[in-house]
Amino acid sequence: MKITVIGGGLAGCEAACYLAKRGYDVTIIEMRGVKTTPCHKTDRLAELVCSNSLKATGDDTASGMLKAEIDRLGGTLLSLARKAAVPAGGALAVDREEFSRLVEEELGRLGVNVVRKEADSVPGEGITLVACGPMVSDKMAEYLSEKCGGGLHFYDAVAPIVSAAGVDTNSAFFAARYDKGEADYLNCPMDKEEYLAFREALLSAEKAVLHDFEKGDVFEGCMPIEALAARGEDAMRYGPLRPVGLRLPDGSKPYAVLQLRKENLAGDAYNLVGFQTNLKFSEQKRVFSLIPALKNAEFLRYGIMHRNTYINAPGCLDADFSLKSAPDVFVVGQLSGVEGYVESMASGLIGAINAVRRAEGEKAFIPPPTTICGALCLHLTAATDNYQPMNANFGILPPLEGGKIKDKKMRKRAYTTRGMHDLENACAAAGL
């Protein structure tokens, strides 16, 4: 049986791998190579656009819990990400080019056909997974708008990348926060005077698309650093510039710290962690160079802002990611309203599982609500006047039974233990 996947991002590739492994004839339709987007730099499949981090791996983190769930459900891309991993402390970060190469190699090995063209609708017959991503083409956006009763959007931002050679290591030091893992981050400290000067420069810097940005339609999870700075003097010090868990080489506490994470396996490029921005390119160089370690920085990629599109899922999607108006069409990835790389993988995987079950006449599989992926599925159906994309977090899970556990890490591990137990039982019952 043939199944079409529209979009070769993380959700689409995860879905295609799952379907191909189960004997289906899978075709991915990907427009890049024929038509690009404002943010993609290549035509490679599974290209990571924003950060190169797939977030934390520990069992006391929501992202780590979600990764464990994906592994249990038969995901593929996480195993490839681990092969392309670069040092990132307690997080899973990858060399973007190597990761894309491994994904394309795996799809080829599985016999997945890739067609380069812009899709303007879904095929008239068979099952289709729409995984176009948040930068969906205008033609497909129009099609989905008709099926979903209108589209929504928010503005997202991308962090810059700098050359390792241009970082002043005399003004920086290697360490992992709380010494978790190896000293994988290059930390760029600022004293109070340097921090305040940097903040003032951010607040007065010229932005690239001010008229769109001023609408305030920006996703909280990717807040531009200049917007965060405007929220208060210490807002950045409680966010990406937080100094907690770090000590200067002389043992003293830094006032604020920018962390740089390796961008590739060669280690010759660094990502500015949490520094998504909407500043003009010339302003990024001027303002970010005020951080002592970046005074001579060479920018390999500047940050940019772009529109991300997602559908109003509660009105048009069921919890298995299928369209209410067209049950053989599944909308997965960030287009559906999940936010984040791993969350997109999870949605593609669950959509593929349910595509198989739809094809074989079986009941839809919705993971238990005590799992992160199950809670994300339920988020799709939660009617609200202000539907927003959702990422992995413990706040979307039901409370633990037996009272609150005071120790924070133990409480988070209890969520993971409960969720994995319930997922195992649900998979056994569903024959997965």
Image (cartoon, rainbow, N blue to C red):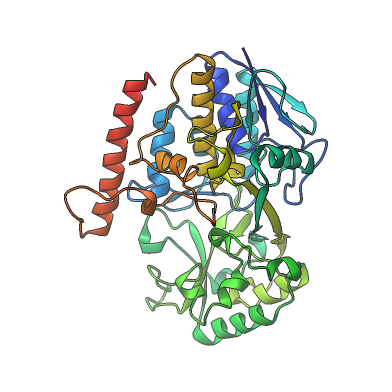
Instruction: Check the picture and name the quadrant holding the C terminus.
Output: top left
Can residue 291 be seen here? The reply is yes
Asked if residue 273 can be seen in this view, the reply is no
Judge by depth and name the residue closer to the eye, 152 or 393.
Answer: 152
Position above or below: 144 against 21: below
Q: Tally the marks.
A: 0
Q: Nearer the viewer, residue 328 or 173?
A: 328
- Please, which residue is most extreme toward the bottom here? 193
**Is residue 407 depicted above or below 196 in this figure?**
above
Residue 304's spot in the image, x, y percent? 71, 60
- Residue drawn where x is 55% and y is 81% of the image: 195
Give the quarter of the figure containing the N terminus: top right
- Closer to the camera in the image, 77 or 327: 327
Is residue 66 placed above or below 241 in the rendered structure?
above
Which residue sits furthest right?
34
Q: Give the residue displayed 20% in from the left and 47% down from the top.
A: 401
Q: Residue 286 location, x and y as percent?
A: 72, 76
Choose between 275 and 269: the one closer to the eye.
275
Write down the quadrant of residue 115 in the picture: top right
Name the side, left or right, on which 120 lies relative to 260. Answer: right
Q: Position of residue 394 (x, y in %)?
A: 36, 52
Residue at the spot 49% in from the left edge and 19% down from the top edge: 357
Q: Position of residue 57 (x, y in %)?
A: 41, 46
- The residue at the point 48 percent across, 36 percent down is 319
Question: Which image quadrant for residue 210?
Answer: bottom right
Above or below 221: residue 358 = above
